[in-house]
Image (cartoon, coloured by chain):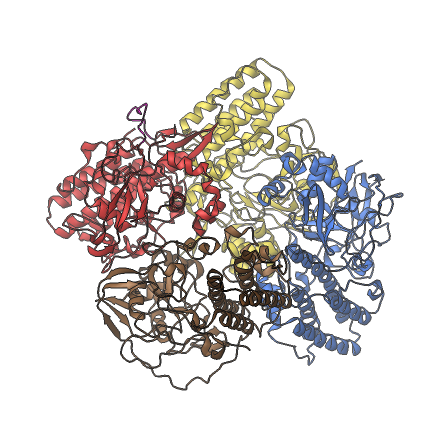
Chain colours: A blue, B brown, C red, D yellow
Amino acid sequence: MGAPRPSDMPGPGQDVVQRLRAVRQQTRELAAGLSDADATVQSMPDASPAKWHLAHTTWFFEEMVLAAQGSPYRPFDPRYGYLFNSYYESLGARHARPERGLLTRPTLAEVNSYRDHVDAALQELLAHTDDAKLRGLVELGCHHEQQHQELLLTDILNLFAKNPLHPAYAGLRRTLPSVVPHYPSTFTRFEGGVVEIGHRGLQFAFDCETPRHQELLPAYWLANRCVTNREWLDFMADGGYSKPLLWLSDGWGEVQRQGWTMPLYWWEDSGAHFSMTLHGAQPLELDAPVTHVSYFEADAFCTWAGKRLPTESEWEAAAQREPCQGNFADSGMLRAVAAAGVGSGPQQLFGDVWEWTRSAFSAYPGFRASTGAVGEYNGKFMSGQMVLRGGSCVTPAGHIRASYRNFFRPDARWQFSGLRLAEDA
Amino acid sequence: MGAPRPSDMPGPGQDVVQRLRAVRQQTRELAAGLSDADATVQSMPDASPAKWHLAHTTWFFEEMVLAAQGSPYRPFDPRYGYLFNSYYESLGARHARPERGLLTRPTLAEVNSYRDHVDAALQELLAHTDDAKLRGLVELGCHHEQQHQELLLTDILNLFAKNPLHPAYAGLRRTLPSVVPHYPSTFTRFEGGVVEIGHRGLQFAFDCETPRHQELLPAYWLANRCVTNREWLDFMADGGYSKPLLWLSDGWGEVQRQGWTMPLYWWEDSGAHFSMTLHGAQPLELDAPVTHVSYFEADAFCTWAGKRLPTESEWEAAAQREPCQGNFADSGMLRAVAAAGVGSGPQQLFGDVWEWTRSAFSAYPGFRASTGAVGEYNGKFMSGQMVLRGGSCVTPAGHIRASYRNFFRPDARWQFSGLRLAEDA
Amino acid sequence: MGAPRPSDMPGPGQDVVQRLRAVRQQTRELAAGLSDADATVQSMPDASPAKWHLAHTTWFFEEMVLAAQGSPYRPFDPRYGYLFNSYYESLGARHARPERGLLTRPTLAEVNSYRDHVDAALQELLAHTDDAKLRGLVELGCHHEQQHQELLLTDILNLFAKNPLHPAYAGLRRTLPSVVPHYPSTFTRFEGGVVEIGHRGLQFAFDCETPRHQELLPAYWLANRCVTNREWLDFMADGGYSKPLLWLSDGWGEVQRQGWTMPLYWWEDSGAHFSMTLHGAQPLELDAPVTHVSYFEADAFCTWAGKRLPTESEWEAAAQREPCQGNFADSGMLRAVAAAGVGSGPQQLFGDVWEWTRSAFSAYPGFRASTGAVGEYNGKFMSGQMVLRGGSCVTPAGHIRASYRNFFRPDARWQFSGLRLAEDA
Amino acid sequence: MGAPRPSDMPGPGQDVVQRLRAVRQQTRELAAGLSDADATVQSMPDASPAKWHLAHTTWFFEEMVLAAQGSPYRPFDPRYGYLFNSYYESLGARHARPERGLLTRPTLAEVNSYRDHVDAALQELLAHTDDAKLRGLVELGCHHEQQHQELLLTDILNLFAKNPLHPAYAGLRRTLPSVVPHYPSTFTRFEGGVVEIGHRGLQFAFDCETPRHQELLPAYWLANRCVTNREWLDFMADGGYSKPLLWLSDGWGEVQRQGWTMPLYWWEDSGAHFSMTLHGAQPLELDAPVTHVSYFEADAFCTWAGKRLPTESEWEAAAQREPCQGNFADSGMLRAVAAAGVGSGPQQLFGDVWEWTRSAFSAYPGFRASTGAVGEYNGKFMSGQMVLRGGSCVTPAGHIRASYRNFFRPDARWQFSGLRLAEDA
């Protein structure tokens, strides 16, 4: 089944027309192995059908770029605006989110025709304009679509994980090494002081990454790799899920309400642990980073370990010194893997798993949301969410950067979310 | 799209082998026009996906007939028992009902292969046996499958009704007459006395229709046709949905909780009323029987009209004198139509719409549930359900009879349920 | 604490003025031992505070008798109509049922003043009128108040049962006999045939007990006493609460949802069973009738025992031959006790525990609800409820008769509800 | 009814024995005018009964001070630990929070005896020890009890507001001035830079106020008074509650789910606005600070006004220069009142209303929770809560300081919560 290939991925420096074509093609390939039914069903209100991701990203271009031009663009189907608006209050009424999975029509084939229609109109439009604002919106649409590429994968995994047959989205790309070396967790010291945080430069970034500003950080330690499945099993064996004093009050509430005893997608059979992956059911890789844990679990693990999560500023101050490389979706592995050997300084900051930070998602000093509909992109989610950093094994490579702020509710587990330990110096 | 054709329908007197083949083929045809996605999605916990109906009816034969033989039958897939058991506690664990729509795998094609596999094994088995008990179970399986044929249609309608695009399951088979005569509602008097109620004879019947027994009925009047959409509009215009004194206490609770103001699938646009049907959105046919009303609505209508619903015995005492003919699924119309002219005595007792009675579903005097798994068929539902009689426009013709007892909760509206007025003599 | 005394209870033949005075006094005494807080708190939406019962029964007289007279009656407080209407849609808006326990004001003392005010006005009115309709409404008000006397006791028990301190409403009136004889369950045969069911004569009865009518009953057996706690322990020991095939489908749903493993108010400690009673926590009396079981549990027990519940007509046909005597609230025991020795024929038909029947609460042939507000009394509850017969140890003696139909939902357990076995002849 | 009097309030410099006596006495007086029922009922799961506050604060001393001494202390009732533990997982099982209102026993009188018993034991213990740790725990217990004094008042208001009779907790202490001057909102500029935040010195503070640390703040403006009811009416008149673009996504969800159209406790009658207060129903005072608004409402108001909420550091940097004076509970007014005239710089920072900040409640750099049970006090609530600053008209005067961090969920409205505008410089 079609996992992303590196050569398809445009770098941030490419022309926007090329980039648009590459990103749109990439999404199509991600869905290539899905049946009409796979692409239609919604596994939970938080997740969306693949077909919806394919259509919504297309609607985004139609609404934000084509419809905004006053050009003679003819909508593919005037009813699609209602069906495929996600949450833009300024763009009219929309289909209820928990009912996205009821839309067996339009079919997957019709949605692909919709994509063709909009792609053609976009290429036509871009061939005849140099308008910077318009190109900026196309750039935004590409980044928006890359976000949905990742969600398409996390949502398909959630759907397949709820199927007792455990279907695989993709075959394993590489033979697993028979022995993965186990590296102990070591820490690097950072001196803190006045650091600059936030997006810098002319490349694309979301509004919430700005403005770049100074913060004053005390000195701190950061672990050189992510917490592993092996370490998580130690936490479980030590009663991690049954000791309320390790947990935030709301976290302990979730443990009891949802009956958590291990990360999402894990199960035990005859003493061995398995997990549901994009390759179907697999035995647990002990030295791979733990993933599909909530903020609450990450926080409890830290308390158990006598450490803490880093703040997002601590993470970014460390990461902005490093090249933005790692195990992204483009590797085709589509799973988190063990750190390749821990040298000097933090590894795995980018890729493998999103890293929970202890920072609530909020506005940087001086933040102003963009105006118009794109202003609904980030600012309105600034309550109840925690920041994650660094991208994961299902994030497109060209999409991530050191200043990138992802955010989810503290009980969310269906993303490829893990953690790295930190400590006061 | 494939609606049922009369010639396919086996009569009750046919040989069980022929009957089996015809019923199984019929189900396949009912699903022929559905896409993989249409057949997979579950629109609400009360409804099931078409694919599930296709597989569950097959599992019923596999489990009740093939597996019970001690024969060398090889199950198509040993995991299907878990997926496609509906509610038989005696037959092991099963997939949760509200999650039936998550099974994008097995695909529709795989389910059809499952049907082929089981059909072949059944034909092979029946070719070499005269065992009466086994043939009885096959007969039961055919009736069970016919029930699911009806549910497949009601559930697809529910799914398509939740799609803002209003897709049609089937084209309109007949041109609607430009003028439908409007017949006034008249009543026929029945003298009551000691009447015999329940199934008689050697033909198939469900256990809950037995034993045939005597009841003592006072004299009563029964309307000669069902209540029509035109009459229902009068009820609405007179404030039927806003006067609590017309309603049962629980019914008024539902009105307020669910915001009912008209039957399910109706809406108003610029003063005209429309409804979602198996032929997509259609203007309301004023003289057709009202359908998709709950027991609570039917009861409130009767109170408003100064009448009452009949008991199931009153209905059966009248119906057992009449031929079991009417507008069933086999007509291909797939919608309730106006009574063909009201002569002497009750019309439309069979077909068009299921008729709510005022009788709670309970055991007849001397009732004994069947033994074994088939004993879970009816008896365990004898609380909280009201009886409906007579079949509907989506009931297979060979499936219904005067003693047939259907039952649903008093708030259910997604079946083709309507009503007929009665009155004390 | 003030339990009812026999001498206070007016018989049905007494003059209505005397009867009114006695019933009103009786209610006051039932609440005499309760604190302001005891009388104010609502333990669940199904139950009401004692203070609310005291006020609502008073409001009933104020609204149905005093306000209806066009007399110069001055309401005690015009806001009380809103606070103390229970469910009469025809009598205006009302305070939400689940919020009855929020009314710390008016105080218990103020509610008692309200009672004094209305009592005085009633006595004044009745001293100067012979109007039969008015006396009929007062009679209805007395019976209505007796219903609430019973509810006051069942609701206080529910409240105290939720208090970890297990407070007692009343002291034990009699020493328990050291040895209670254990009588085996025997059965009496009834021949059935055409029997008359329903209220007869000039004494008061609720509208749902009428009209008296004929029914045709097959012959049946009826147990000579109620099912006991000892027998219930056998059911539990045999896995009664863990075998789904014993249960109605909805019943098994409740078992799982609510985690039922024994009757309400029971618990086990070191192998012995206890229950919460109006006398506080008490060891289980093995030969007393089981109580605080739902219809679902009663039905499951019958299935386990190879018997069934009687229909309400079977019960009434047997009970109308017997004197209406038994262990009612007036005995002061306020708990169900072992049958006094089983002679010939059914014992305990009246008093001790309400007996679940297998009959859904519905209209008798020819039933017409009363007109006006009192017509909302019974008819609007004719869905979703099962009939119980015979009264209990907290029912006032003068309130019950053979034709009396009580009704509750099949999952209700907080009434003194038990069962008697029946069988087809 | 007994509102707090200034002379009763111990200052932070008093001896702990005196302070203990004064605080305990103060709580008793706050509850003096409540009936047994008033003190028993729980109006919602977030609120607790007054009797519970009286008992829980007592249990805190019993458990944290008396039981921890190994002294010969005899518990008043060994069952009270289960009843009156709030959320301390380390101190054993406890009564479920939403069922606190079911405890009609122990009575209010018994709880007062419990208070006497513990007070006597505490005085006896403190008379014979100079142990600093123990005196620290008593100090903590006093601050804990002061928190519950405020909650007792906010919870009683919530209870009385749900009573259609609108009872008053206390009479109005002062005549309202006939004309309150209306001061325009002006702003003061703060230069920011490196500021010190957090508790300093030897006086008591909660662990979450520490450690004092440096932060780097950009320059900012802070309004000189709180937002008023008059300004809130402007927001409402301009459609504030019906424009989704003004709201955080979660906030708009609450507006729709709960139907918010004005602050909690407000209603409109014939064009005038009223609110429920501790003095019963009152006409709205236009120039008093708005109160009983959620974080979501406060944030939406700021967006509407083109401003923002301050961060907690911005607030504290301004407040630590000001004397800790204002309209606290000790004024006896028990309502927020108009600023007394806006001179130079921010007024009303302390008292009147808690001020929402845009800061999520989280750990300061270097924060360590206290060890033992008292460590469960703050740290475990560090998710999902927003910080409020400055105290309110129902906060005890000796309880508040510039570094004090209160926190509630962003949808909470039953506290005296308001807001002050801020802006980037």
Relative horizontal placement of residue A107, taking residue B243 as reference (left or right): right
Is A72 magenta? The answer is no
- The residue range painted magenta reads C169-182
Q: Residue at x 51, y 24 (%)?
A: D22
Foreground of the two, C56 or C248: C248
Q: Name above or below for residue C210 compared with residue D54.
A: below
Asked if residue C93 can be seen in this view, the reply is: yes
Splitting the image into 4 quarters, where does residue D355 fall?
Answer: top right
Task: Pinpoint residue C204: horizontal percent, then vertical percent.
Answer: 18, 48
Is C173 magenta? The answer is yes
Relative horizontal placement of residue A380, taking residue C130 as reference (left or right): right
Task: Pinpoint residue A5: horizontal percent, then vertical percent.
Answer: 82, 63
Task: Pinpoint residue A368: horizontal percent, then vertical percent.
Answer: 70, 57
Q: Residue furthest bottom?
A: B178
Relative horizontal placement of residue C351, taking residue D320 as reference (left or right): left
Splitting the image into 4 quarters, where does residue D250 fall?
Answer: bottom right
Asked if residue D178 can be seen in this view, the reply is: no
Relative horizontal placement of residue C370, taking residue B349 as reference (left or right): left
Which quarter of the figure is the N terminus of chain A placed in?
bottom right
Q: Residue furthest top?
A: D128
Q: Residue furthest right?
A: A344
Q: Residue at x 36, y 76 (%)?
A: B230
Is most of the magenta stretch helix, strand or loop?
loop
